[in-house]
Amino acid sequence: MLLRIRTRDGTERLHIPESTTSTTTTKISDVQKRIAEEAWGVPVDAQSLSTDPTHLLLNTTNTNNNNTISTTTKTNNSHHHLLGPEQTLSALGVRDGDILYMRYDTVERRATKSKIPFASLHSKPFGETRTIEAMISEQTRIGRQEEGPHVASVSFCGHAANAFQSYVNNTLGFRQSRFGWLYGTKTKKTSKKTKEKGKEEESGERVATTELFADVIYEPKQTGNAFVARFDEDDEESQTAEAIARAMGYERIGCVFNQSDADRGDESVSAMSAHEVTLCAKLQAKYGKEFVAVIVMQFEDENEEMQVTFEAFQVSDQCVKLYKEGFFELDEESGVAKLPPPSSSSSGNGGGNGEEEKENKESTSPFSNWGSHTKMVKPVMVERKDVTEVDNDFWLVAVPIKDHTGTSQSGFPIENRLHPPQNVDEIRSAIKSRPGSSYAEKLRDFHLLLFLCKQMDKNDVVAIAKSTNDYVDGGDVSEGYKVLIDAIAGIS
């Protein structure tokens, strides 16, 4: 319980321990003892407490010497009430956060020896004044990131983007979430930073910007419901996918996921939920400032027809910093904001292996943490107010999105989907459907190479993946690998 004790020296906060925190049983004598023994060293017999602020205007202290009842005197036509030691806070109407007014005889006070145990406050000697600048410096103030994202844009391979949105739209019907890792390349550009000065533009220093090009979407094994897709980031297949992508000249540059059409509640006015914001903060903290998140969502156009759109975001540097410092309310196991509570309702199959999982039986109804605010475990300041929930839009930084033609072949069935299935017949179709191309060009398909790891040694497939980078300059896959792959595909 928190009480504020105001004296002529200022106002101090007094914490009543949990063991005695009950307004029906806590007495004024308990408060006096706490002041004397735990806080500022003013002896009980030197204290004079009241609920009346005019108590501090008296010229002399009128102490209740017999310690049995409260007394009344007059000050400036106002009744002044001294509090007796046996009175309870409940009877006085004193509640958490209320102010009591204290006068005390001239005594040699000691400085506070220990911190008052409040997470958001800092201890200091009783009566010590604090400047506005000092208090502001201790506050965590939330603001929007004005300087924009850390990347100039993210460009999607048109086929990869279409293959992802087609699956979540036509197969999953936007009824559950689907997640994928973005693999591609980064291009650094240097340009002059300009700023407006009146009607003229003033040239500034040269700055480097990064453009991202996503050629491949890898969809790991996952189970999903209307709110989230669960997956193991470090399982064996994911490690193999990472090795093949790097052999092809790609790196992990971001992630993509869709938002289902489940009702997110009346609060859902932000582009991202609390879960999605904290997921992005977690991934940016791990993969760096140039990591992006792309959201696939559907909306109703002016003709009342459903359309699919891609939006790219980063979360602000402040969001990542506060995530690392433990400001967000997170699920201990996943490290992101908590999900809806379990329910008997089912949101459909996870889409990875056709098996029904318990995770799919979570509620699709709205809940408070899925709306437009992120919960904090420590108070922060937003627009001059102390809050424990922050509007998600404060964290988001939009990233321009483009499209291009990727360097990876397409057409091979994508892993971990309900259909179409991957099999060796698809290898044969991929090779025969590209006449005139070199063998390396025919095999430069991320999903094909990942499937080949189930038929061949992983190290051999990584070597083949490296050789697919050379087809532009006339390089090709070695004859030994050609013979082996043809045999696997049944090509005579």
Image (spheres, helix red, strand yellow):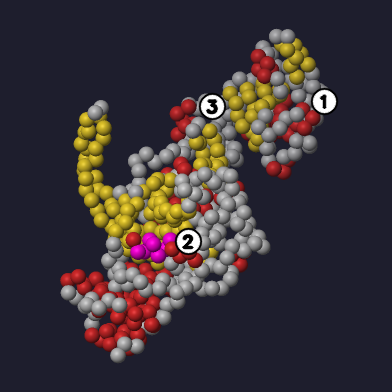
Q: Amino acid at mark 3?
A: Glu
User: x%, y% of residue 197?
Assistant: 25, 29
Residue range in magenta is 159-165
Q: Residue furthest bottom?
A: 492
The residue that disc 2 covers is 169
**Distance (Cα) linking label 2 and label 1:** 76 Å
**Distance (Cα) linking label 2 and label 3:** 63 Å
Q: Quadrant of the C terminus?
A: bottom left
Q: Tag 3's secondary structure? A: loop
Disc nearest the viewer among 2 and 3: 2
The residue that disc 3 covers is 128
Q: Is residue 315 visible?
A: yes
Q: Quadrant of the N terminus?
A: top right
Answer whether residue 53 is magenta in the image: no
Q: Residue at x 46, y 46 (%)?
A: 302
10 Å neighbourhood of mark 2: few (<14), some, or many (≥20)? some
10 Å neighbourhood of mark 1: few (<14), some, or many (≥20)? few
Dot placed on the residue nearer the N-terminal end, 2 or 1: 1
Please name whichever residue, 280 or 376, is drawn nearer the observer in this view of the structure: 280
Q: Amino acid at mark 1?
A: Thr
Q: Residue at x 64, y 29 (%)?
A: 4
Using the image, determine if residue 65 lies above or below residue 218. Answer: above
Q: Residue furthest top?
A: 76
146 lies left or right of 370: left
The residue that disc 1 covers is 68
User: Mark 2 near mark 3, Cβ–Cβ under 8 Å?
Assistant: no
Checking the image for residue 450, the label placed there is none
Q: Quadrant of residue 435?
A: bottom left
User: x%, y% of residue 136?
Assistant: 47, 32
